[in-house]
Image (cartoon, rainbow, N blue to C red):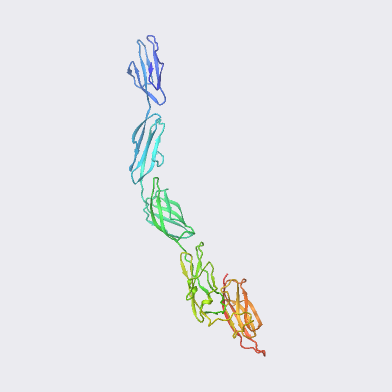
Amino acid sequence: ATSGLHGAIAPAGPISANAGDNLGFTMTPDAGYHIQSVLVDGVSQGTIPAFAFTNITANHTIRAIFAIDQFTVTASAGANGSISPSGAVPLNYGASQTFTITPDPGYYIVDLAVDSVNAGAQTSYTFTNVTSNHSITASFGTHLAPELTSISASSAYRGETINITVTGMNFMNGWTRLNCGAGIAVDTLAVHGSDTLLATITASAAAIPGTRTFTVTNNPPGGGTSQGLSFTVLNHIPGSFHLLAPATGDTIVLKSTPVPIAFGWNRSADLDISDTLTYILHLAGTPAGDDPTVKGDTTLSLSGLMGTLSPHTIYTWSVKVTDGYDTVAAADTFMFRTSDGAIASVLNGKNHIPKEYALDQNYPNPFNPVTRIQFDVPRQSIVTLAVYNALGQQVAMLIDRELMNAGVQEIGFDGSHVASGTYFYHLAAEDVTKDGARKAPFVSIRKMILLK
């Protein structure tokens, strides 16, 4: 009794038997092997695991032959790609085998099924230490562009969040990406079926206004394709505003010693909170016509302007505002006149006695919250000076029927206790003659602007 490699026969070797005895043998292959054949007296008995001699009357031989187990991996590929090797691939027990998956040009690997279980979109797969039959199947898909057909909203203001619906074809569910460029955050909400995408777009406050491409990208394994639609980041235009002072028709009294001239206007509103508004003052026919600017403020005082103005001349002035992207002009253009000539500026009547009563424009104007009011008294007079709001209600009594000597007088007004707005200051002066008789009073009213 003998055996080949990778198995055993029992009992083995030369075995004595008496005539008429019976004797049985068992064949056992090693792990990973099987019985290939059992030869009895040189004649194959097949792959039997046991054999018995009965009623022995002669000498005999028995030999067991073994072979390694072999398995099959069935490899297949769908349309538009291949797998190598393919077909029924035989493998010995414990062997390993690598399969390579290759999509045709313009296609990608959708899935790899190993023994009917999804193994992902892999370009290769290796079976190791094979001990059973297996199967491997590759499937492929085409790189289709999104073919966008519409977008529900094509613009958003800076700092605004909007929801959009993009419709088209060939959205790869779970693989869609969106991009609008710098300053635009895009969050995908959901892809519905293969043709509708819901998303949330947020334009940051710092986003630069303008049109850019809204891109939708199919990004399946192995690469993607894109298509874009126009998307615009909008800018809130600065709001309209009006000029305040010098009011149109005002007279600027020229001084022999020039004093600053203050210009004021309403504030423009800008819904983009990150913008800083810059106001641009234009004074036609003056050196200041080169457009002095001020950021964020609504007053601008020009100290050197008076010295450049001509007497008895009409000047126009206007203001524009810009947020860096759009520029808006004030709703009106004002004009002012200059006096006939320079007037000496001496306060408190010490060195100059004016010839006539006069009430000057307060300075500065607009003001916040303190301004100065100057007036001329040619003779000793009883003076009253009060401040009224736009409803005609008195808000301050600055001089209450005081006897004042002749001269150029000045008094301050502190508006910290009242609200921003337009106010009027009213001067009444009664001339007192040597004999105590009184003439008709001098009355003058001027407007001033308080801007807090």
The answer to whether 96 is drawn above or below residue 408 in the figure is above
Q: Relative to 275, is 229 on the left or the right? A: left
Q: Residue 169, percent across and down?
A: 37, 52
Count of marks, rendered view: 0
Residue at figure coordinates x 53%, y 77% from the top left? 307
Using the image as rendered, state which of residue 424 and residue 48 is in the foreground: 424
User: Where on the picture, by quarter, is residue 49?
Assistant: top left
Check the image and name the residue furthest to the top: 19
Q: Residue 323, percent across and down?
A: 48, 65
Q: Residue 443, percent across and down?
A: 59, 83
Split into 4 quadrants, where in the image is the N terminus?
A: top left
Q: Relative to 309, is 69 on the left or the right? A: left
The answer to whether 130 is drawn above or below residue 366 in the figure is above
Residue at figure coordinates x 54%, y 68% from the top left? 297
Residue at figure coordinates x 40%, y 14% from the top left? 13
Q: Residue 319, percent across and down?
A: 49, 71
The answer to whether 26 is drawn above or below residue 102 in the figure is above
**Residue 246 in view here:** no
The answer to whether 142 is drawn above or below residue 2 in the figure is below
Split into 4 quadrants, where in the image is the C terminus?
A: bottom right
Q: Relative to 388, is 134 on the left or the right? A: left
**Residue 230 in view here:** yes
